[in-house]
Amino acid sequence: MIKLNQLSFSEYDLNEILKSSEANKLVLFIGAGFSKFSETDLVKIPTWGELINELKDELGLSGESDFLKIAQLYFLKYGQHSYVKKVKSSIKDLDPSPFHKKLFEFNPRYIITTNWDDLLEKTARDVGLAYDLVASDVDLAQSHLDKKIIKMHGDFRQNNFVFKEDDYLQYSQNFPLIENFVKGIFSTSTVIFLGYSFNDYDLKQIVSWITTISKATPRKFLLQKNYDDAQALYLRNHGISLLTPTKTDIDYHDLYSEFFNDFRVVKNQEELIKRTISSAEAEEEKIENAKMMSDADKLKLRREVQDLVKGKVRKFVDGKLKALTQYNILLPEQISRKLTNCIIEYKKSDVTLISDKSFATNDFDKHIRKINNIYLNDVLTKNSESAQKFSSILEKALISEVMYDSRLCKVSESSEMDEGLYKKLTFGYAKESAEILIINKNYAKLLDLLTSKVKHYINEKNYILATISMANFDNIYRICRVQINIGRGDFNKDDLMKIERMSPFDYKSKVIDFPRELQSDLQDLIKILEFNEIYKAYYRFDVESKKNLGFSNTRKNGGIVFSSDEFKMRARLYPYVYFILGNEILIEEYAEIRQLFEFNMLGSFEHYLLEDRFYVNVIDLFILMKYCETNKLKDFSIELVRDRKIISASLLDGRKLYNIKRYLLVTLSNMCNLMNLRNSNSIHTTSIDRWTNNLLIVLGLVKWNPIQLKKIINNLIPLLERRTHNMVVYESIVSLISVNAHLYHSFHPDILKIIDVVLEKILKEKFNGFDQQIILLGTMRNIFSLTENNNYKYDNINLLNLVLLKIKSFNEEMKKFITNNLLIDIKGIGSDAVKIAIDDFVRENILNLLLKTPKDIMDRLLLIVHGYPAPEGFSGVIEKFVSDNIPNNLTELDIITAGVESDLPALLKILIEDKGFVEFKVALDNFNQRMKTLKR
């Protein structure tokens, strides 16, 4: 059997001990022999036998061999004081040995000793570790630290040391708590006995305890110099395994030195693997140089060596990557940091993991690079369990290629994972999803959901996702408490009671109790959850963005500069999006997260446009819609529309455009569904509103054929049919149509359904203040203009007639408002029947109204401009109005709200120059003359 690890002890046994240490389930049992390592040339510690011989000599019992009886007789003959003094004299004031310090490298949860000295507690203090000292039942009852040094045979401090026969016989009465506690430890912990011999009475007493417990318990080890078959069989029968070195000619000191050194090597698996590979190379050289061996035998042995190395490397690297399997999605750098000596290279569509000699890394180590290449070649060329796990990890990080040892290997893609991410990227959230519950402020239900997730992941032993769910819970709970404390938040009585019964997980304190081997990964995760990693990323991207813009400006001004990474910034940004989405980290709406993505995405586009280049993909669009402020995205779209730069600078081919359009259409459908999931009782703008408005801006920048544009419009119309909460969605839809018409001369008459929506709201008395503002401010004016330019007509005469009938029941002010701000515009694009119906309504309901206010006069002028007859003597009315009010009353509220200063001369000019109403010229000239006096 070929041996490559150069360890003195069984690697299997050492690994079991290491696992117990990492799981906080390792116990060291220290006997009298261990204290002898603290002896000096001048001060020696008597063994138990030597101390008993002293007692025998003083008692004159040379023929007695029962140690416990001798101690008991000494006590009976000389009394308590002399007995205690004699036993205490055996304990010397010594310093802990280096081996005592090495004990704590095992990270024992408990150190149990039958010794009375204070070497162990001294060592704990010296190395700065917190262990409770337990030397009595009272100490144990009052102990509060998880880690303990248990002096099960008492000590001199409490004068309760165990030595004589009565002490052992009455142990269960004197130390009932400690006895039961130690027995319980044997049932749940791995135990190593150090400093005991086969014939040690204390060991025999402990063995009797172990014998009574179940066989299905963690292993117990006794460290000894030599392997003895009979003793091993005896101990094995009592549940203890012998721990002996392969060397048989070592002394007691070297036994412990080898054991501690071997454990240190196994603890540092990387060093062990390096040694193994070095040994394998030496072994292969020895095989190659063997003159008496056939080529076939050499080949067989070399393969055996290589398979052994591959197995150990595979186990080592799998162990390093184990924690990563608990994530749903990974950052590529999480893999490169685990492997070390690797880099991640980003391209537009590929992410490559590189472990190749042609690429230098800051942590270069030729041995680690060799380990990586052995592992990568093994798992990327075989269909083993390790290969499947590693492939899954690569997929989670969206790594598409691996380069190692001058080879390039493509990574297969999982359609299942892509579908899960694509659903989130297209805003395909379910009603009961955490994202929608947050937006609708349904916090009680969300906290229940997160609690169930924590329970599920703990049960599945997925401590990474459990930590994320606990962090999500704590964040939402904190929001609830703040809103409750300041009297905000729409909590019903049941929800309020439910939240009051809840308490935060305090996830950072909880993770300390998770498996030790995950602690490093959990701390890395906490840095992300607490935004530390986000802040670092923001800084890195900020520096890179400014550098890239500097390069572009230099070239624009005639300079020559180039960086191979200049156009890769966005690709480095994407993994953060995937990581947050895929692992359901509920921090997307935090300002820090949105700013990270908004700033860097818009900065990248600015950099591209300086180069007269425009490139976008699905994830770019998602970031723009999900994280950008609508006004900033609108400003960016204006830049793209200006001089049709989006067309002239585009680098998108037909296939990419097809994928983008398909993505946007799916997203539009999902977004419309989200608007239906939005809390209809809320009057506040939500994230769904922002996402929707951003989507509409993006939709306007894409060229759509008539069928697609029709589909888009018909998806959007139901959004307007809902109760209007703000004007933005109207503005965004109109902007979509207007921009698309400007860029691509696209238009579809179905957009006229927006007029139907407004009329239906009037008919059903759902025409609220926002709707009124929309028509007052001319938000839909571009729709009317584009309809007219494309020679389409509004012809829904049946609906119009019903609405006109409804308006007749309104008060005068509302009749005039709807007429001037809506009906006149509809008439401009209406069919003959529509025009007649509106004209009839105006004649019967508006033209007969008295002119009482400045607004009435201005409204009547507007109607005359649109072809309605002027009242008899109306020009004189205008002249008098000008004489009475201009300029003296321009600051009066009714004059201001009627828009007299700006609109009156404009309307008069149209009537005179375009309509031929010269009778208004006197009023206009008078107005202008009076305004001149104001300017002086």
Image (spheres, helix red, strand yellow):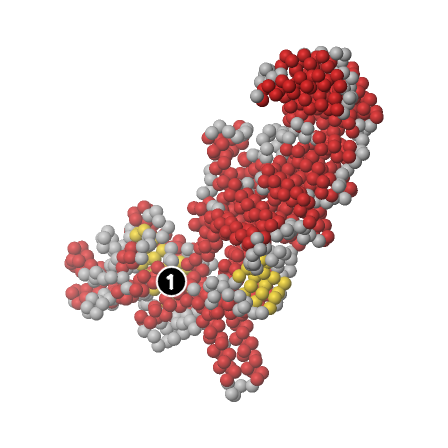
Residue 633 against residue 803 in the figure, above or below = below
Give the quarter of the image for residue 567: bottom right
Residue 2 against residue 164 in the figure, above or below = below
Q: Position of residue 140 (x, y in %)?
A: 32, 49
Residue drawn 73% across and 17% down? 920
Residue drawn 56% across and 63% down? 354
Q: Where is residue 133 in the image (x, y as percent from the top left)?
A: 30, 52
Residue 38 visible, this angle:
yes
Residue 138 against residue 208 in the figure, above or below = above
Q: Is residue 113 left or right of residue 675?
A: left
| Quadrant including the C terminus | top right
Residue drawn 32% across and 73% down? 251
Q: Is residue 839 left or right of residue 52?
A: right
Q: In this view, does 256 lie to the left or right of 17?
A: left
Q: Where is residue 609 in the image (x, y as percent from the top left)?
A: 62, 49
- Depth check: 99 or 657 in front? 657
Give the quarter of the image for residue 68: bottom left
Determine which residue is flagged by label 1.
192
